[in-house]
Image (cartoon, rainbow, N blue to C red):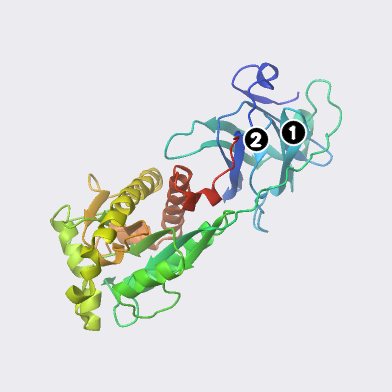
Amino acid sequence: MKRMIYAFGVFAALWGGFVHASEAALSARLSQDGSENRLEIDLTTRPAFRVFTVDDPKRVVVDFPELGWRLDPPRPGQAMQLIQGVRFGLVRPGASRLVIDLKRASAVTAAFTTEGDARAPARFVIELRPESDEAFAASAGWPGGETSDAELRPIPQPKPKRAVIVAIDAGHGGRDSGASSGWVIEKDLVLRYARELAAAIEMRPGYKAFLVREKDEFLRLRTRVERAREAGADMMISIHADALAAGVASGASVYTLSKDASDAEAAALVESHNRTDDIAGVAVAAEETDVTSVLVDLARRSTDAASVGLAEALVTQLKARSKVLRGRALQSAGFRVLKAPDVPSVLVELGFLNSARDRARITSDEGRAAMVTALSEGIYNWVLTQSSPRYRWAQPETAD
């Protein structure tokens, strides 16, 4: 028996009529969990679809109304057990097709779409698991009157004029080791996070990551800000994993800049983080006279608002994928590393190294992968909501 999945009512009735140039696929990701493979596609709208399988060669076919495919096909690694490749394009006016070429017989265990909102795009998700060749052949087949695979007509992809540059600042470094607990040293842990976050960001077309420090080196706080600005950064994420009094806190949190700390724990973190310049013997007060200027103050008003929006997008993803500091996942404090007047900046506390639960979470492969995914998704979702021209290059083109 042929096995097909339809969404949003009778597919044929929804195949045409509501297609617009602004309806587009934006990016795609492949992932593997044990023997299961998963494909996620970010979309500007939530479309109708149908899914079926075809044998000889084995593949999964997903039909959509016409979409603008503004992405590069995701490339499955050698470890991907089921998916050989992904291709897409138009099959006729008003109709698009996604084809998942398979390495072996696979069953579709889930296929669904989600609504988009101001913080996240709509998504199409399909999940596959292995099945026998006999079971695959029994359910495979073309729907309706179709008898062969229509030729996919690729859509030329617009190239970004300039990538959105994400500066990633791994806290501490060199003689400033940061917090520690047993074998875990903050400066080393956060540099690993920074490198993996950079790799995740650069997997998306239109994005480029800049590592403020690429090795174990000591940097003054002002130098970190200067490096990000010199790189043309459109935002900066500073990564830390501090320590507080035992039992006080557990979970990730995101900070934006403010004159006053949001609570006593935030104040303690500020004192710890800002001590970096004390190690360098820097006269901080003399360096920050530019912050008092009218022009810098005006620039910072817009930057601070953008920083809060970025922090909110990150917290949303962290809540969905990891553990956050209860009731205080979004905070503010006077971190000097966040003081670039023209670069939206946030500081991410992965967790607290003297918390056994946090230490286990943020040092495990699973916990690190969840955090990196949450941060990269939060960045991407926030960029999609921005109207400033500096972020438009990484966003999909829309109809005039």
- Please state if 143 lies on the left or on the right of 353 as rendered: right
Give x and y (percent) for residue 147: 86, 27
The vertical placement of 66 against 200, above or below, is: above
Helix, strand or loop at label 1? It is: strand
Q: Quadrant of the C terminus?
A: top right
Which residue is nearer to you in this view: 289 or 330?
Answer: 289
Give x and y (percent) for residue 170: 38, 68
Residue type at mark 2? Val
The vertical placement of 207 against 54, above or below, is: below
Q: Residues within 10 Å of mark 1 (few under 14, many from 20)?
A: many
Which residue is nearer to you in this view: 233 or 211?
Answer: 233
Helix, strand or loop at label 2? It is: strand
Q: Which mark is residue 189?
A: none
Q: Are marks 2 and 1 in contact (CB under 8 Å)?
A: yes
Give x and y (percent) for residue 180: 28, 72
**In terms of image quadrants, where is residue 229?**
bottom left
Q: CA distance from mark 2 to mark 1?
A: 9 Å
The residue that appears at 45% across and 56% down in the rendered structure is: 372
Q: Earlier in the sequence, mark 2 or mark 1?
A: 1
Residue type at mark 1? Thr
Give the residue number, with chain letter if any, for mark 2: 108
- Please state if 28 lies on the left or on the right of 294 as rendered: right
Residue 183 in sight: no
Q: Which mark is residue 53?
A: 1
Give x and y (percent) for residue 177: 30, 77
Q: Residues within 10 Å of mark 2 (few under 14, many from 20)?
A: many
Residue 238 in sight: yes
- Please state if 111 lies on the left or on the right of 302 as rendered: right
**In terms of image quadrants, where is residue 222?**
bottom left
The residue that appears at 65% across and 51% down in the rendered structure is: 74
Residue closest to the far front: 294
Which residue is nearer to you in this view: 356 or 371?
Answer: 371
